[in-house]
Image (cartoon, rainbow, N blue to C red):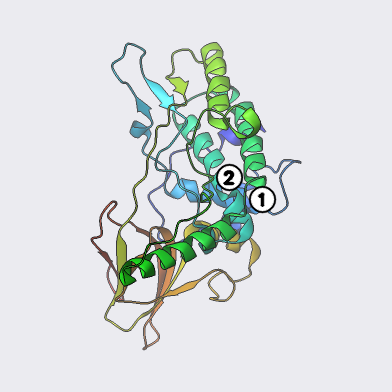
Amino acid sequence: MIAALAALTGPAAAQAQTPPDAAALKAIEAKVPPQSWYPEGYYDVRIAAEADIAEQARATDELVSDWDDGLGSRYDVYDCGAESPPALEVDPITARYGFAASEVARLRSEMGRLKYPVGVYAEPLLAFERAKIAEAASAPDPQAEALRLAEWEAAYAAAEAAGREPPVFDSPFYDPGSDSGEEGAEGQADPYSALATALETNRMRLAPKLPRVVADGGCGAGEGGPVTVKTSPPGGEVLLVNAFAFKVCTRKAANPWDRFACKWNEIETGVAKPLSGRYVYQVKWPDGTVRKGTRDIVPIYDSDEAVTVTFKKSGS
């Protein structure tokens, strides 16, 4: 199993314009075997996470930092850019366990690319994965919480527009990707801190010359501004699905491009709306022309300025 993990740690290719098909996802199974303690449905999410991370891995030279504090270079197991899949854009299993699966895939990939021996990270990563699964399983339903938050945001905007006192959101929104402290539920060690401790212990024994492993975190994320989707020429019908969700669906559906098989959403063109992340798209024009692919949609953070994303009938 350790050798299998090592085989999947090569550098990521450039972002694919065509998402992996069922055969490509099936091939990953040989390198990421299921565990007996995986919850039902999780393995499909875990395999999809491997493919998803391979498409958008951080550059290797961004993984290690040196703060000129005399302690040398270090690898932080936290990634401040890591995000949970949007709960309302994915299926219930992916909404609950998608972040856990993605973090395991990311950490395994990064440790491998930094040349840490598999013996340093194989067992600690399994323990981390088990802890993150348990954490997600005991958390509130992320889709129900996301729906409540969306309803509250709509009510807040309506109250502001009418000059009324905005309502108060009466419970914290569940964020499985939050970096909130040093301890987890019931006083247990935070999974990232426990992981870093185990990795560092193994590193000192097996690879003392490689960067130290830490769990510093300290992340803070801003809100993304609106995005306006357009087609060139106008008149195209735009369907988007979260790229992670598409990979999970590809594991289950005979034809994931069927708009009713996966969580495809028709996007109203010319209207600024919140939209952020990596999406698989299919755009159809009235003459029957269809363009398909994968695209990152990146808003301007901490700004109300809208970004325009244009899907073209021809060209790039």
Which residue does the image show at 51% across and 71% down from the upper left?
Answer: 264
Q: Position of residue 116 (x, y in %)?
A: 50, 24
Q: Amino acid at mark 2?
A: Ala
Q: Position of residue 195 (x, y in %)?
A: 56, 27
The answer to whether 157 appears left or right of 262 in the picture is left
The answer to whether 62 appears left or right of 131 in the picture is left
The answer to whether 122 appears left or right of 65 in the picture is right
Q: Position of residue 276 (x, y in %)?
A: 38, 58
Residue under circle 2?
Answer: 101
Front residue of 203/169: it is: 169
Q: Residue furthest right?
A: 36
Which residue does the image show at 49% across and 51% down from the upper left?
Answer: 52
Q: Amino acid at mark 1?
A: Tyr
Q: Residue furthest left?
A: 305
Mark 2 in CB contact with mark 1 (< 8 angstroms):
yes
Residue under circle 1?
Answer: 42
